[in-house]
Image (cartoon, helix red, strand yellow):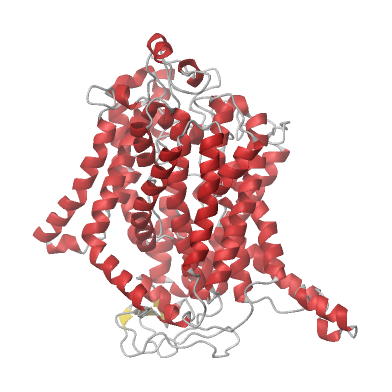
Amino acid sequence: MAGGATAPVIMVSYANDLKQNENAPSEPLVTVDDKIAQVSTASGDERGVPLSSENEDTKFLKGHPVLETGLEVSKYLISARDDGDPAFTFRCIVLGTAFTALSSVITMLYTFKPVQMQVSATFLQLMIFIFGEAWARITPRPDKIKVKWLRGTLRILNFGQPFGIKEHVVASQIASSGNNGLSGIEVYAIERLFYDRSISASTAVLATFSISLKAPISTRSVFKKVFGGASSNEGMGLLNFTLDWQYIQSTYLSLPFKQQINTWAGYFIWYPVMLSLWYGNAWGAKTFPFMSASLFSANGTSFSTTSILTSDNVVDRAKLERVGLPYLTSSTVWGFFSQNLAIGALITHVLIFYGKDMILAWKQARARTQPDPHYQGMLKYKEVPMWWYFVLFGLAFIAGIIVTAKGETTLPVWGYIISLLLGGFIAPFSAILVGLFGNGIATNQISKMVAGAVHPGRPLANLYFASWSHQVILLAVGLANWLKIGQYTKVPHRVMFTTQIYGTLLGAALNYVVMTIIVTNERDVLLDPVGTNVWSGSSLQSMNSQAITWALAKDMYSLQGRYFIVPIGILIGLALPVIHWGVNRWSPRIRKWPINTPIIVFYSGASYFGITSFIWSSITVGVFSQLWLRRRMPHIYNKYNYLIGAALDGGSQIIIFVLSFAVMGASGKEHPFPKWWGNPSGNPDHCMSSSE
């Protein structure tokens, strides 16, 4: 699932390009027609060009546009200028490489946290901008050097030369691409934790390249489930507010308001469903923890993955009959079900509501007639030839063939090919949703379902199948996102293509190193079904649970299986947008509502494990930013909204980076803070003591 990084990137590159429209009225929120939106730099140099000769229905408040649509963002926040400055430089490669290291390490750390996050793209851009400007200002200028060879060397090193927008974007793309190979690294971590095996160095290299309170205990227990959420798998965090920005993040400062509304609708479905499943003892819920992504035995103890496998990591039916089928918590069943609902709804929703737009976009791309001025401004640059893509695909494909044929993945070559085809089918639907709503849904569940159907009894094959399949989707969405950013900032297509590959491979190598260190040093807590508020293996536990249970799909998800409702979710999901379409035809008023069924149903079960205390804080941030600040104080929102979010993201992530290694034990030795009321030895919400 890719985030909407486009807006923050553009805000950094063009933060000073937005100028107050002098011709706009100062009265609150009125419609202005026949005005030209002028884009200029802070110094007043008119290097920008008008994007339109009319403002249509754009609203202005005190001369500043109130941004309501993506078109208005493109018109008023993004300049169509192209300074012709160099994009691929020594400086951008060095800065991109350095910040890839920071981005990869922090993202890998969050893989083993109760909530998974990625480094803020805007924060990376701000840091690269600061270092790029310093490089330009404090290094000697070549034109003041008399020695010819030294002068030429300094020019190659970009000493004393202005730090351009295109350099900035390319360096930022390299740093942000460093997490494109994360999916493969997660598989290696699961192998180390749950299968007691470490893959060979050659397999890792080739596969990474290819994949890239004082009440009674009973009362406190209820309060913990409903209101707790500061610790992993504790509760639903209802009305729980946190000031910990590492979990809030700037996502809700940048996502379109229509996306946020659908997310909130999903959350309000999630609360009653979770409680109903638990207190209704659905699927034997009360035998297991309220929230956990782990597998359990029938008596509620942790289920050992290796207890039902042969030495080749294939299910041993004799062992399975002796040990018994694994169980899932009710929260996990609902999480899996809601993911399938969302996948089915995604396909139908896109076809019904955006099918005509897809056909039009395809025709315009083929004829190069897309009217977007940013697209037209890029026509002077050479496109990436298709043979570049074919060569890259060929190399990655061959690497994958070698891994499946020679590595101990238990995945046959034909299964590897099916995984790529499946990812290629789903990728366009995910890309469209991300492009329209700024964020997407998790689609890796369908990869595990198909893997379980074609490779029964092979959980490790399931993991590799899903990793390759889902990576196709992630890379397609990520590449499209960054190519659009390159279009907005006029970075040549070939530079964007090359640097993204470089950043992906560099980041994957660093991810692998950090994963190995953390899994080695924090193995016990990562295997704990509950975890702590510092470390948690919930994400990896969930991936492994899916792999094991789908490898046993005939026993667990068939018509006679315990969790038959899960695969049926896709069929139900396919029908939801049809119902939505029918309601729209019946009531034109509802047609104006920005309802998106895939997002609603996905978020109705997305938080089935981990920390939940951030939910209400995130909603508050979204309401403040998108509902109030954007509409009432556009002069502040347009200039500072994304930058403030990036500053908060960056500060919290740098602190987590330092604390993880210096205090929390990622480097091997823990140096905990003293215990006091604000840092209790037991439950951080003070709901239960450590012994309860």
Farthest residue in the right direction?
A: 147
**Res 635 visible:** yes
In-front residue for pair 303/457: 457
Task: Where is residue 236? Give x, y as percent.
Answer: 40, 35
In-front residue for pair 672/142: 142
**Res 612 visible:** no
Q: Give residue 415's quadrant in the image.
A: top left
Farthest residue in the top direction?
A: 322
Task: Where is residue 390? Give x, y as percent.
Answer: 49, 60
At 30% across and 73% down in the image, what residue appears?
363
Tell me: residue 129, above or below residue 652.
below
Tell me: residue 350, above or below residue 333.
below
At 57% across and 41% down in the image, what residue appears?
185
At 67% across and 52% down in the image, what residue appears?
101
Farthest residue in the left direction?
A: 586
Task: Where is residue 555? Give x, y as percent.
Answer: 31, 21
**Number of on-image labels:** 0
At 51% across and 52% down in the image, what residue appears?
249
Q: Is residue 657 left or right of residue 550?
A: right
Q: Is residue 263 left or right of residue 407?
A: left
Q: Give residue 254's quadrant in the image.
A: bottom left
Task: Where is residue 603? Give x, y as percent.
Answer: 35, 45
